[in-house]
Image: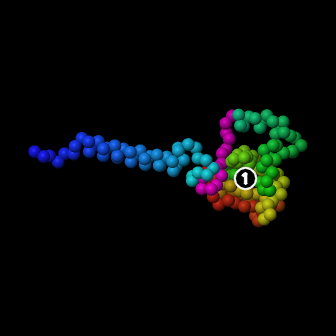
Amino acid sequence: MNSKRPSVMKSTARAGAGGAVVIGALLALLFLRGGGGSPGPDSETNSGTPMVTTETDQTATEIPAKAPSQSDSSGGLTADEEKALSGELLSILIDERSYLMAVPTDSEPIYRPKELSRLLKLAALAEGDSNGIRVRILQRETARVSANEDLKAELAKIGISSDAVYTQAEFIP
């Protein structure tokens, strides 16, 4: 009797080959996705835009609050505010109804919460780029339209026209 059952060697070889294909596919997937680590600046998930982080841990918020230049009564600039104005324009991130000032760093900008009145004073100090843009408005998906309108209206009140304000079309994660 000759049955059509595969021999033990043939089924073992097929299982091994199938397992190798599955493992190879998993390795290729991990390699193409960046190995499962945190995405780097050139990762596909960034779409060419810089990643944005908001520092909210206790040490990040306590250190600037204790700095002597933070509570300068003469209206001087803090170190973060000087960094934010070191470029030609001031970047403001709107998250829901809150305003955050962009502080450039070597890798990614850091966003610090600021009151609207303080942001207006900083915007007045911004020099502007070669196109005359003095303020760049960034938004998260949770940004409220009313917060954006309020910011633009307040900027207009201090003499920064809508021509000097650029609103970025892409949302910041």
* Residue that numbered label 1 is attached to: 92
Specify whether residue 113 is in view.
Answer: no
- Quadrant for the N terminus in the image: top left
Describe residue 90's horizontal placement relative to residue 47 as left or right: right
Describe residue 74's horizontal placement relative to residue 58 as left or right: right
**Residue 157 placed where, x, y %?**
80, 59
Q: Give the magenta range.
A: 46-58
Q: Residue at the spot x=72%, y=61% of the render?
A: 166
In which quarter of the view is residue 6 placed? top left
Q: Is residue 89 magenta?
A: no
Is label 1 in a helix, a strand or a loop? strand
**Residue 37 placed where, x, y %?**
56, 43
In which quarter of the view is residue 150 placed? bottom right
Q: Residue at the spot x=43%, y=48% of the render?
A: 25
Q: Is residue 61 above or below residue 141?
A: above
Count numbered badges in the picture: 1
Q: Amino acid at mark 1?
A: Ile
Q: Main secondary structure of the magenta part?
A: loop
**Residue 153 placed where, x, y %?**
75, 59
Describe residue 3's horizontal placement relative to residue 105 as left or right: left
Image color mode:
rainbow
Q: Residue furthest front?
A: 9
Q: Nearer the viewer, residue 122 or 155?
A: 122
Q: Nearer the viewer, residue 147 or 85?
A: 85
Q: Nearer the viewer, residue 13 or 86?
A: 13
Mark 1 burial class by Cα count in 10 Å: few <14, some 14-19, many 20+: many
**Residue 64 placed where, x, y %?**
77, 38
Q: Residue furthest right?
A: 74
Q: Is residue 49 magenta?
A: yes
Q: Residue at the spot x=26%, y=42% of the render?
A: 9
Q: Is residue 160 above or below residue 10?
A: below
Q: Residue at the spot x=83%, y=57% of the render?
A: 127
